[in-house]
Image (tube, helix red, strand yellow):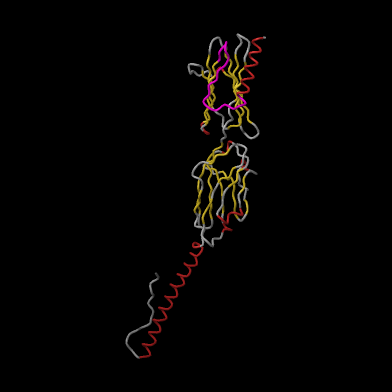
């Protein structure tokens, strides 16, 4: 606080006129000092007024990862709370990808600002401006790709505050039930076991095992392709010469989706095929197997 400056005004004893003059002089000085303090206090209050009307930012994003298959659209949820009377026209919403902080989408001055948007997300992102007034800063990501997987940051700021929240996107899809086909040859020719799986992401682990449980995958041929949505189509073949009863096991392991499928096929040269399964077989497979057995019996009899 500013110290009072001494002035040449005396309150000593003297004539009544001198005393009155001195009292007025001291009062004037105190009044000026009081007014100065009040003006500074008023200025501080006016400066603090916007703080009272601030958004009081508190961003909320999902704690658990959000999962989406390739080729689909996904909404990354982000909401923020604010005080009544806040000026939402000055809100800035920015979605980024750490750690490089690539700009996924940016919104301020009441409209999308995409000059700095990373090319990877061009024409694939959307906010919901009409819902900002209710605290919705969610991002719509279209045509999800495998490379979209990772962390995302939702940041909401205004003139005096800034806050953000991180979330994770996982790109994954389960594979269809494996379709197993058995090529029944003439005696002495190798048997071909063919497995097809489709519609999943990312690529699973495929194994072929013999009766002893040894990995014989290197004896198989596996082809894979990716459709327009980014989903895998996989076909694996194993050839084996069967002179006595032999058991072969096919395994698919897709840990992202906690999907694990195992098929044990026992081939008998004289009696045919027996299949053991650890997950449900589709009806189409059963019908296919019957047809193959009938075809094999016909070829053997020919």
Tell me the quarter of the image containing the C terminus. Answer: top right
Whether 198 is among the magenta residues is: no
Name of the residue lying farthest toward the left = 13
Counting from the top left corner in percent of width and height, residue 218 is at: 54, 18
Relative depth, front residue between 242 and 34: 242
- Count up the numbered dots: 0
Q: Residue at x 63, y 43 (%)?
A: 124
Whether 279 is among the magenta residues is: yes
Q: Is residue 21 above or below residue 240?
A: below
Tell me the quarter of the image containing the N terminus. Answer: bottom left
Q: Residue at x 63, y 23 (%)?
A: 287
Counting from the top left corner in percent of width and height, residue 194 is at: 60, 20
Counting from the top left corner in percent of width and height, residue 177 is at: 58, 28
Relative depth, front residue between 251 and 27: 251
* Res. 281 image quadrant: top right
Q: Residue at x 49, y 44 (%)?
A: 63
Q: Is residue 192 above or below residue 19?
A: above
Relative depth, front residue between 105 and 205: 205
Residues drawn in magenta: 267-285
Q: Is residue 92 above or below residue 297?
A: below
Q: Is residue 259 above or below residue 183?
A: below
């Amino acid at each position: 606080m500013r110290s009072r400056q001494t002035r040449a005004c005396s309150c000593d004893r003297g004539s009544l006129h001198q005393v009155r003059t001195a009292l007025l002089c001291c009062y004037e000085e105190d009044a000026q000092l009081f007014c100065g303090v009040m003006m500074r206090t008023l200025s501080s209050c006016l400066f603090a007024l916007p703080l009272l009307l601030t958004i009081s930012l508190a961003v909320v994003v999902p704690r658990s990862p959000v999962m989406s298959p390739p080729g689909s659209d996904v909404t990354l949820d982000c909401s923020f709370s604010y005080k009544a009377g806040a000026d939402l026209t000055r809100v800035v919403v920015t979605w980024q990808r750490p750690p490089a902080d690539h700009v996924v989408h940016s919104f301020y001055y009441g409209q999308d600002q995409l000059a700095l948007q990373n090319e990877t997300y061009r024409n694939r992102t959307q906010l919901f401006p009409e819902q900002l007034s209710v605290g919705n800063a969610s991002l719509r990501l279209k045509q999800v790709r495998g490379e979209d997987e990772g962390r995302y940051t939702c940041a909401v700021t205004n003139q005096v505050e800034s806050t953000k929240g991180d979330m994770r996107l996982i790109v994954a899809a389960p594979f269809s039930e494996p379709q197993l086909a058995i090529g029944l040859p003439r005696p002495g020719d190798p048997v071909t076991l063919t497995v097809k799986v489709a519609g999943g992401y990312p690529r699973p682990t495929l194994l072929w095992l013999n009766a002893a449980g040894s990995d014989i995958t290197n004896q198989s041929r596996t082809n894979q392709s990716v459709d327009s949505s980014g989903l895998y189509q996989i076909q694996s073949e194993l050839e084996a010469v069967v002179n006595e009863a032999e058991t072969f096991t096919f395994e698919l392991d897709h840990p992202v989706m906690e999907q694990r499928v195992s098929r044990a096929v026992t081939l008998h040269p004289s009696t045919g095929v027996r299949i053991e399964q650890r997950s449900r077989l589709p009806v189409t497979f059963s019908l296919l197997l019957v047809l193959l057995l009938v075809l094999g019996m016909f070829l053997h009899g020919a």
